[in-house]
Image: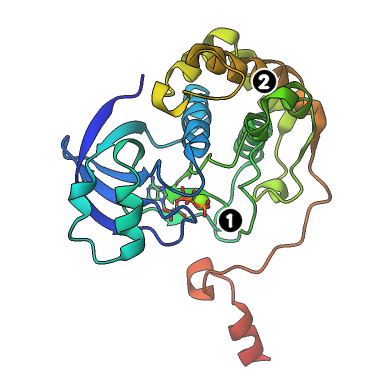
Amino acid sequence: MLTEVTATRYVTPLREGGSLPGIVEADDLGTYVMKFTGAGQGRKTLVAEVVCGQLGRRLGLRVPELTGIQLDPVIGLGEPDQEVQELLKASGGLNLGMDYLPGSIGFDPLAYEVDPAEAGRIVWFDALINNVDRSWRNPNMLVWHGDVWLIDHGATMIWHHNWPGAAASAAKPYDASDHVLARFRPDIPAAAAELAPLVTEELLTEVAADVPDEWLVDEPGFATTDALRRAYVEALLPRAASIHARITLGEPTAPRPSRAPGWLTGRPDADEKEAGA
Ligand SMILES: Nc1ncnc2c1ncn2[C@@H]1O[C@H](COP(=O)(O)OP(=O)(O)OP(=O)(O)O)[C@@H](O)[C@H]1O
Ligand SMILES: [Mg+2]
């Protein structure tokens, strides 16, 4: 079970997130990035965040702590933005919180070096959970106190959108050629040797148990929420043992243009180069 807190103040929306997550304060005096059950992406996104986030944490990867957040939409009454008002109104009850990392910045592959061992662990983990959302366009990683942190595991485990085809879907390869860390020569064999043995049936069962019942009820084809939890375990367990052999990295790509200005990356950016030419 996730710990649970109650939201006391809606601070501000995070506009860079497609699902319009918000920063909230809670009754434990913590500050959280909150993902809403009423967001258009649906509650399966939150299930994926819990299963994959907790799994990553149990494997020793840096994922900010997750918690359940109870929301009374009344806390948003003073919120001037209609889109935010509607999201809060549609999200009464239990939502997902992620520990807010103050002062973190978005990962930029041109400004930050990741060693092959760490890159290997992250790419292997993303292959396991079939994460399609860690590309150079949208890295979904933060740098905080000099370390890389993984966020946003909502677009993973595509098989949970079509359970009858789940076994076949989870047996498919993983194309990592677009992965933001593909250019850091990820050491996949070392990562698989280290991490795959940790992904046991017991660990996956514990991770699935952290998903709140209210996000699992009424899934067609499943009589109980525990039967659905079991389906998550059964998709991930065989994939952990074999996915390392089905990861495509592609050719190492040339550095992509950085969005960060040259003064931050220590390299001249495109405008500066043009000006100097
Ligand atoms: N724990 C955190 N601490 C600090 N900032 C965060 C944290 N989690 C998310 N953010 C910020 O909020 C943004 C949106 O978060 P996230 O990517 O999880 O949302 P999303 O709606 O799933 O986004 P996407 O559009 O990628 O699907 C991130 O890019 C980051 O800038
Ligand atoms: Mg994101």
Residue at far top of view: 202
Q: Quadrant of residue 76?
A: bottom left
Question: How busy is the neighbourhood of tag 2: few (under 14 within 10 Å), some, or many (20 plus)?
Answer: many
Kindly tell me whether residue 157 is visible in this rendering.
Answer: yes
Scheme of image coloration: rainbow
- The image shows residue 241, relative to residue 68, as above or below, that is above
Q: Gap between marks 1 and 2, in whole Å?
A: 26 Å
Q: Could you say where residue 69 lies in the image, as x and y percent from the top left?
A: 29, 35
Residue 235, disc: 2
Amino acid type of the residue that numbered disc 2 sits on in the rendered structure: Ala
User: Relative to 272, is 16 on the left or the right?
Assistant: left
Q: Which residue is mark 1?
A: 138
Disc 1 under 8 Å from ligand 1? The reply is yes
In the displayed structure image, the side of residue 200 where residue 80 appears, left or right: left
Q: Is residue 105 above or below residue 191?
A: below
Q: Is mark 2 within 8 Å of ligand 1?
A: no
Which marked residue is nearer to the observer: mark 1 or mark 2?
2
Residue type beneath disc 1: Asn
In which quadrant is the C terminus drawn?
A: bottom right
- The x, y position of residue 208, in whole percent, is 50, 19
Residue in the image at 61% along x and 91% along y: 275
The residue lying toward the viewer, choosing from 78 and 197, is 78
Query: Closer to the camera, 25 or 102?
Result: 25
Who's the residue at 52% across and 29% down the image?
A: 56
Q: Secondary structure at mark 1?
A: loop
Q: Secondary structure at mark 2?
A: helix
**Res 66 → quadrant:** top left
Q: Position of residue 233 (x, y in %)?
A: 60, 16
Give neighbour class at mark 1: few <14, some 14-19, many 20+ (Cα, 10 Å): some
